[in-house]
Image (spheres, rainbow, N blue to C red):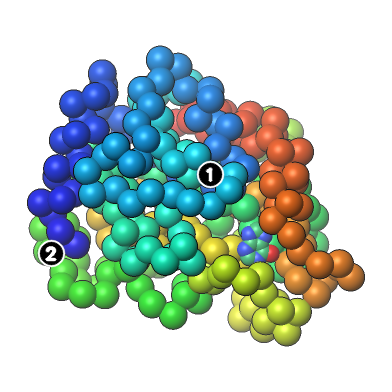
Amino acid sequence: MKSKEMKESAEFIEARLQEKPTIGLILGSGLGVLADEIENPVVIPYKSVPHFPESTVSGHKGQLVAGRLEGKQVIAMQGRFHFYEGYRMDQVTFPVRVMKLLGVEKLLVTNAAGGINEQFEPGNLMLIEDHINNMGTNPLIGPNDEEIGPRFPDMSQAYNRELLEHARKCAEDLNLAIQQGVYVGNTGPTYETGAEVRMLRTLGGDAVGMSTVPEVIVAAHMGIKVLGISCISNMAAGILDQPLSHQEVIETTERVRQDFLSFVKQIVNTLP
Ligand code: HPA
């Protein structure tokens, strides 16, 4: 955790923004379209920001988009850094650290995930109630800066209860059927085996993906309130008798784009 680098990145971004963002958005695979809804956008490619790594996976753009969404000042990551791309955990979570310095108090994290819970269907949106860190490492390993957060952070409320309640109410108001459950973060880049999916179900997982957990840990470390939404892009391996593909993930997220956009916009619009 290099606070000098964090500050330099934040200063670079701040100099380009008209107003301070209070809400951060991390847009996962196929969900980056939300950034197109931001009014008077200031677009900052990751590669132009000092100390930012560069995003590589297809379906991800690799830029910050800041501006007004539903009357609120937001800053969105259109594309994120994944552990499986070879980035270190401190690189994966670096933008969240920078968001905090920019003034972000609430973070809306989204991802595409495989459904482990057999009640789920591809195209469902799932509110993340909790997670299981199955990545075998932790972004907070290493020296701790007590000014940023505690050595042993509480994770029992990593997903903010008021924000969850708020999101449930928004879904109700929109007549949108949503799922809720536990997100398991795996490293990827392989999808799971059928046996692994059965194991994760036994362990209490409802959905599985390759992101989100590191960012949420770092957000919790800094006292940022998190709301997480998974788009169930496919049933996890071994549930249906068909192979998984990134193509299916992208196609499903495109299919539910409208629901996803209305949901997030309603959430942002009615945030206190
Ligand atoms: N497994 C892991 N990550 C994923 C999946 C999956 O089935 N779908 C989308 N991201």
Task: Please identify the residue farthest to the right as the structure is shown.
Answer: 241
Q: Quadrant of residue 63?
A: top left
Q: Type of residue at label 1?
A: His
Q: How many marks?
A: 2
Q: Name the spot of residue 13 as percent of width and height, x first.
A: 24, 33
Give 40 or 68, whichever is nearer the viewer.
Answer: 40
Q: CA distance from mark 2 to mark 1?
A: 31 Å
Q: Which residue appears at 36% of the width and 23% of the height? A: 42
In this rendering, does residue 27 appear at all? no
Label 1 Cα crowd, 10 Å radius (few <14 / some 14-19 / many 20+): some
Residue placed at 15% from the left, 51% from the top? 5
Left or right: 43, with 206 as reference point: left
For label 1, the SS is: loop
Residue 60 circle label: 1
State ligand 1's quadrant.
bottom right
Instruction: Tell me which residue sits at (34%, 66%) in the image.
Output: 89
Above or below residue 225? Residue 157 is below
Q: Is residue 175 above or below residue 216?
A: above
Disc with the residue nearer the chain's start (2 vs 1): 1
Q: Amino acid at mark 2?
A: Asp
Q: SS at mark 2?
A: loop
Which residue in the structure is indicated by mark 2? 145
